[in-house]
Amino acid sequence: MKLSLTAAHAALAISLLVGALPPVHAQTAAPATAPAAPESGGPVDPAKIQELVIANHVLTDLNVIDGFGHISMRHPGNPNRYLLSRSVAPALVTADDIMEYDLASNPVDAKGRNSFFERYIHGEIYKARPDVMAVIHTHSLGVIPFGIGGVPLRPVFLLGAFLSPSVPVFDIRKAAGQTNMLVGTPDLGKSLASTLGSRSVALLRGHGSVVVASTVPMAVFRAYYSNVNASLQSQAMALGGKVNYMEPEESQKTLATIENIHGRAWDLWKRAALEKMTAK
């Protein structure tokens, strides 16, 4: 006899077969746990915050930075933290924009604020240089030719003595091949810090410079006079004769003088910046 399988019989057979199989549960990934934010290094004197804010405006007024570039300071109470504004043009920085980071460049409390992509410049230099209390990254036009032209930036006048004997150049291609030229990872920040070594200034090929110092005012002084020295050196080279650079020994002797007088320039720049900030 020929058996025919009706639709009902087929449904019954399938249900029995399925019932005999072990249940299959959907594989759902456990929700990712966001890493805990680092703890704060503690309260900071509002006057120190204001100094960092003013430095942003001074650097803009001096044409050291424009819509790009940034300055940070090491946390006064905790060497494993630093302070840097949110990602905003320096001329617009206020005290509310200042953020705290650990040395891995993780924000302590972002509060919805965006961070600079190149903040690793700061964190990795602070890791490598315990003596550094302030870091500036600029795109100063005067220094860029010396990062691409094969001619080292060297001190040519007394206020550029901190550039002695010459300024190293960080070529990001040697660290990471073809990139977008930005120091956007801890490894690239570490490579830049290695190029900087124990010096005060390093150039970034086709990009700009990084400047460090033991105080915010001194960092601003060095950033400004790096650019001035670069312009003077370019002018001297254009004359076609032999440039008479400062000797390492006289540069070293001049550094003590700069240490004693740089505050005069800072006071002038600070007052001008405050007047503009108050007038807004």
Image (cartoon, rainbow, N blue to C red):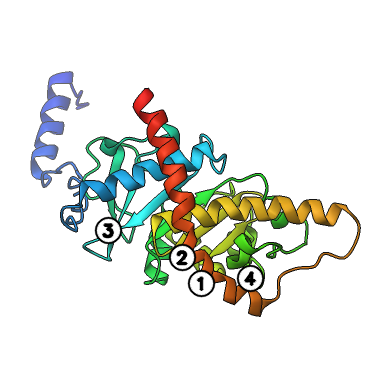
Judging by the rendered image, the residue that carries numbered circle 3 is 75
Looking at the image, residue 134 lies above or below residue 11: below
Q: Is residue 7 left or right of residue 267?
A: left
Looking at the image, residue 65 lies above or below residue 176: above
Q: Nearer the viewer, mark 3 or mark 2?
A: 2
Q: Are marks 1 and 2 in contact (CB under 8 Å)?
A: yes
Q: CA distance from mark 4 to mark 1?
A: 14 Å
The amino acid type of the residue labelled 2 equals Asn
Judging by the rendered image, the residue that carries numbered circle 2 is 260
Is residue 116 shown to the viewer in this render?
no
Judging by the rendered image, the residue that carries numbered circle 4 is 164
Q: Which mark is residue 256?
A: 1
- Which of 83 and 225 lies nearest the eye of the viewer? 225
Among numbered discs 3 and 2, the one appearing first in the sequence: 3
Q: Position of residue 163 (x, y in %)?
A: 61, 66
Q: CA distance from mark 3 to mark 4?
A: 28 Å
